[in-house]
Image (tube, rainbow, N blue to C red):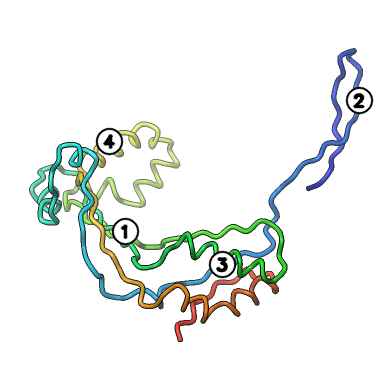
């Protein structure tokens, strides 16, 4: 929180000055911990989450049904996506424990804990020339630079939505140890990072 002086015009048309209290976010530390050592390398199960349309119709959608939506489609631009999910930790409870751990250092300001997923999607696309062209990074950059994305962007998004599988496919990966074990092995590292106002990235201690 800080105070600024600003000028304003009163009801009589005269210019006056006044003090205004403002606030802004100041990041005092920002560190990340890679949890991959705690995630099992082999997926636990693959499941299909039916779309809202399927649920309304009371449909039962199997993994094979979802695959056939993609393989039997004749569309030139089509896509099927598998999302990786982690199973076994209560992330909201873990967030509360992490905040409490940071508070134990005497830190009293606002704390933000987020869970960021990286490379958690696997996409399979049509082998057609049009699909290769539409998904080319070079083509996207050129469209952006030339502002053609304003014209072709909505068209591509529409075609991609139509060509995508209706239902969501997820692969669940089990956490190999509990969140309490994670805190037990990594609490000191977290405390030190807060005290040192760290901006580094760390790999979680597993043993």
Query: What residue appears at the point 29 percent right and 49 percent down from the top-left corner?
Result: 135
Is the residue marked by circle 1 packed among few (<14), some (14-19), or many (20+) residues within 10 Å?
A: few
The number of numbered badges drawn on the structure is 4
Mark 3 or mark 2: name the one nearer the start of the chain.
2
Is the residue marked by circle 3 packed among few (<14), some (14-19), or many (20+) residues within 10 Å?
A: some
* Label 2 sits on residue: 16
Is the residue marked by circle 2 packed among few (<14), some (14-19), or many (20+) residues within 10 Å?
A: few
Mark 2 or mark 1: name the one nearer the start of the chain.
2
Calculate the distance from the C-alpha at mark 2 to the C-alpha at mark 1: 57 Å
17 up-or-down from 180: above or below? above
Q: Please name whichever residue, 81 or 2, is drawn nearer the observer in this view of the structure.
A: 2
* Label 4 sits on residue: 158
Q: Residue furthest bottom?
A: 207
* Label 3 sits on residue: 98
Answer yes or no: is residue 130 visible: no
Calculate the distance from the C-alpha at mark 1 to the C-alpha at mark 4: 20 Å
Mark 2 or mark 4: name the one nearer the start of the chain.
2
- Give SS at disc 1: strand
Answer yes or no: is residue 77 visible: yes
Query: What residue appears at the point 51 percent right and 71 percent down from the top-left corner?
Result: 33
* Label 1 sits on residue: 121
Mark 4 or mark 3: name the one nearer the start of the chain.
3
Calculate the distance from the C-alpha at mark 3 to the C-alpha at mark 1: 27 Å
Mark 3 or mark 1: name the one nearer the start of the chain.
3
Calculate the distance from the C-alpha at mark 4 to the C-alpha at mark 3: 41 Å
**Residue 59: x and y, percent?**
13, 43
Calculate the distance from the C-alpha at mark 2 to the C-alpha at mark 4: 54 Å
**Residue 64: x and y, percent?**
10, 56
């Amino acid at each position: 929180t800080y105070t600024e002086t600003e000028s304003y015009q009163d009801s009589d048309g005269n210019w006056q000055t006044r003090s205004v209290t403002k606030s802004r976010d100041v990041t005092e530390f920002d560190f990340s911990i890679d949890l991959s050592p705690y995630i099992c390398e082999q997926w636990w199960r693959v499941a299909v989450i039916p779309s809202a349309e399927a649920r309304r119709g009371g449909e039962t959608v199997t993994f094979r049904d979802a695959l056939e939506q993609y393989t039997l489609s004749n569309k030139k631009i089509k896509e099927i996506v598998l999302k990786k999910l982690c199973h076994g930790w209560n992330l909201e409870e873990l967030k509360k424990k992490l905040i409490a751990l940071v508070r134990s250092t005497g830190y009293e300001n606002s704390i933000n804990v987020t869970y960021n997923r990286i490379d958690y999607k696997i996409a399979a696309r049509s082998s057609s020339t049009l699909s290769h062209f539409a998904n080319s990074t070079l083509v996207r950059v050129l469209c952006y630079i030339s502002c053609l994305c304003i014209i072709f962007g909505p068209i591509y998004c529409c075609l991609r939505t139509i060509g995508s599988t209706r239902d969501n496919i997820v692969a669940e990966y089990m956490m190999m140890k509990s969140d309490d074990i994670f805190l037990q092995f990594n609490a000191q590292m977290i405390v030190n990072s807060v005290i040192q106002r760290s901006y580094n990235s760390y790999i979680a201690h597993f043993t």
